[in-house]
Image (cartoon, coloured by chain):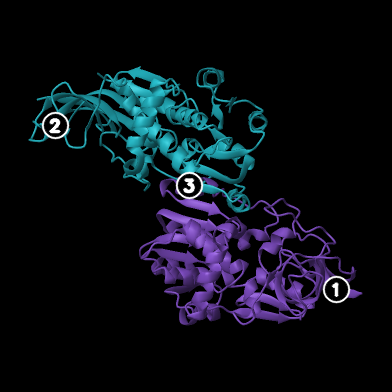
Chain colours: A cyan, B purple
Amino acid sequence: MVASTQIVLASRPVGAPTAANFRTETAELPPLADGQVLLRTLYLSLDPYMRGRMSAAKSYAAPVGVGDVMVGGTVSEVLESRDPGLAKGDVVQSYSGWQTHQVTQAKGLRALDPDLAPVSTALGVLGMPGFTAYSGLLKIGRPEEGQTLVVAAASGPVGSAVGQIARIRGLRAVGIAGGPKKVAYLRDELGFDAAIDHRAPDFADQLRAAVPDGVDIYFENVGGAVAAAVYPLLNTYARVPVCGLIADYNAASAQEGPDRLPAFYSRILTKSLTVRGFIQTEFVREMYSDFLRDMSGWIAQGRVKYREDIVDGLERAPEAFIGLLEGRNFGKLLVRTG
Amino acid sequence: MVASTQIVLASRPVGAPTAANFRTETAELPPLADGQVLLRTLYLSLDPYMRGRMSAAKSYAAPVGVGDVMVGGTVSEVLESRDPGLAKGDVVQSYSGWQTHQVTQAKGLRALDPDLAPVSTALGVLGMPGFTAYSGLLKIGRPEEGQTLVVAAASGPVGSAVGQIARIRGLRAVGIAGGPKKVAYLRDELGFDAAIDHRAPDFADQLRAAVPDGVDIYFENVGGAVAAAVYPLLNTYARVPVCGLIADYNAASAQEGPDRLPAFYSRILTKSLTVRGFIQTEFVREMYSDFLRDMSGWIAQGRVKYREDIVDGLERAPEAFIGLLEGRNFGKLLVRTG
C-alpha cells in the first residue's frame, strides 16, 4: 500500500483564501488495475485559476468539492506501471492535484523528454501558461508588426511569454508588474520596450507616456485598477484577449458604485474594440503542436526566457498560493514535492 | 439663387434632446462650380447615431458644431448639374443633412435606380441600417445553422434585417420590441420564431423561456435593461456585435452603483464571450456589393420585408427624432421633404 499526502479544500473562502481553507490528509491508494500507473509528484503548479475552483459559483469548470483534493497540474515520475505505454522511471505531465502520489489511468498522460528542456517547464513556459500566452496573443490579439501591446503580471509565466512573443513578432511590448525588482527584470532581462510599476503613484501617467501611439493589444490577465488605466489608451480596433482577472477573484460581493459598465460598454462601441474571453483549451487541438515547436525553438535560441519561483514541500502550497494571489511570487510558481 | 431651409444644432442637449436644441434657418446657396450639383432633398433619414453627434464628446465621428446643419443621410433629386456623371432628374443617395437643398460635389454621390426598389430604401433596408445588420451579423456574429439569435429594437430597420437574415441562415431568431403592435408585427409579418415586449413586467422570464438552448448571438443595438436581461442567457463562445446603445445615449452623467463592470467582465472570461463594437463603414469595401446583391435578392423573393415610418415636412424632423430615441417610431423613420 502506498499513502498519498493530500491537501484538500476544508472550506470555501469568503474573499481572500486563508490557511484555514485547506487541510492536510493522508489517503491510502488502491492497488493498480490494468492500464493504470502509480505516480509520485515531482512538481505541482500553482495558478490563479485555482481561486475560481475554490468557489461554488459556476464557472468554465466544476468547482472543487469541500473535502476534495485541490486540483492542479503536475509533473510526476512513474513508480509503477500496468500500462505498456509507460515504464517505471518515466516522467509525465499529469493532473494529480495537490498531493504527493496518485493512482490514475495511463491514457492521457504525456511523457516528457528530460533532455529537451527541464521537466518543470511543462507546467510553465512549455505548458498551460505558455500556451495561454501563445494562443491568446496570436489567435485573438492578431499582432501586427509595429503595433503596441500592453500586458500586466508581466513577470509571471503568461505575461512574460506574451511580451516576448510580441517582441519576436515586431511589436512594441510594454509590461506592467509590481515592484522595482520585477520591473527591472522585464526591462533588463526580458527586453520589454518599457516596464512600469503599477504600485507607482503616477502609474497611469507613466503608462500613457510609454504608449505614444496608443495600445493595439491589451492582453488582459489581471483586471481591476490596471485595466481601468489601460482602456482609455486603446486604439480603434484594439483587441483585448481576456484570460484572467486575478484582481477581481477575491471580490466577495458586488462592488460600490458608480456603475462603470455603461461607459465601458460605450467605449467598446465607439472604439470598435474586440473584447474576447478565452481558456487555452479552446485552441489546443488547433495549435498545440505549433506552440511546442515554436516555443521550444525560441527558448533554445534564447529569444524567450523564463523564470521559476520554486517552493519546497507540499505543506507550503497553501501559503504559496495565498502569496500568488497577492503577487508575492516572482516567476512561475511551482511546489517541488519530489 | 436657391434658398435651403436648414435645421441646425442650436445647443447641445443635456440628457434627452428637446425642441429647443434645434433651430430652423434659411441659407442662400452659392452658384454651382464645375463638378458640382444642386440637390433637392426627397427623404432624410433619422437614425439613433445622430444623438451622439449632438454631444461634444469625442466619438468615432466628429460632433456637429453648434450652429451647424444637423448631419444625416438623404435621397435627393438632381435639380442642376455641372458634372458629366449626373443629369437633371437623377435621384442620388447623398449626405445633405437636415435641409431641403444642397450644393455639393457630384463625386461620391451614388445614383439610384428607381425601377429596382423604391428610392427611400437606400436609407433603410438597402442602405446603412441594412448594411449594419448584414455586416455585423455575418462578420462578427458568425451565424451557424441551428443557433439562437436575439436582437432588440427588432421592428426597426437594423433589428428587423438582423432577424430576417438570421432566419435565412437557419437560426432561431428572437426579437424584442416595445408594445404589442410591434411584437405582433415581428411574429406575424416578419416570421420571428419568438417576439417579446420589453415593457412586460415579466420580460426577463419571457425571454428565458424563448431561448431554451441559450443565446449564441446577441446583436446589440440598445444596451440598458435589455442587455442586462440577455447577458445571463449567453452560451459559451457567444458573440455580441455592438452597433448601438440607444438606451444609454441620453445618460447625462455617471450612473448610480452598484458597479456592474466586474461581474460583466468576469462573464466575458468565464463564458469565452466575444464582445465587438463596430461601425458599418469598416466593412464597406469588403462586402457592400455582396450586401446589395443579397439583400435586393431577398427583398425580391419576399424573404426580407421592411417597414417605413414616414413623416412629412422637414419642420417635423426634431419632433420625430426625439420620438425615435423614445421608441415611438414603427419601422425605418424617414422625413419626406420633397
Q: Is residue A315 at all visible to an observer of this figure?
A: no
Give the image location of residue A277, x and y in percent: 45, 45
At horizontal 14% and vertical 30% (from top left) the residue drawn is A37
Tell me the subunit letter for badge 2: A
Q: Is residue A309 above or below residue B297?
A: above
Identify residue type, mark 1: Ser
Q: Are marks 3 and 1 in contact (CB under 8 Å)?
A: no
Give the image location of residue A172, x and y in percent: 57, 31
Residue holding disc 2:
A85
User: What is the CA distance from the residue labelled 3 to the residue labelled 1?
Assistant: 48 Å
- Name the secondary structure under disc 2: loop
Residue holding disc 3:
A276
- Name the secondary structure under disc 3: strand
Q: Nearer the viewer, residue B281 or A317?
A: B281
Residue holding disc 1:
B4
Give the image location of residue B245, x and y in percent: 60, 60
Give the image location of residue A150, x and y in percent: 56, 34
Q: Nearer the viewer, residue A253 or B230?
A: B230
Q: Judge from the rendering whether residue A192 lies leftward or rightward of residue B34; answer left or right.
A: left
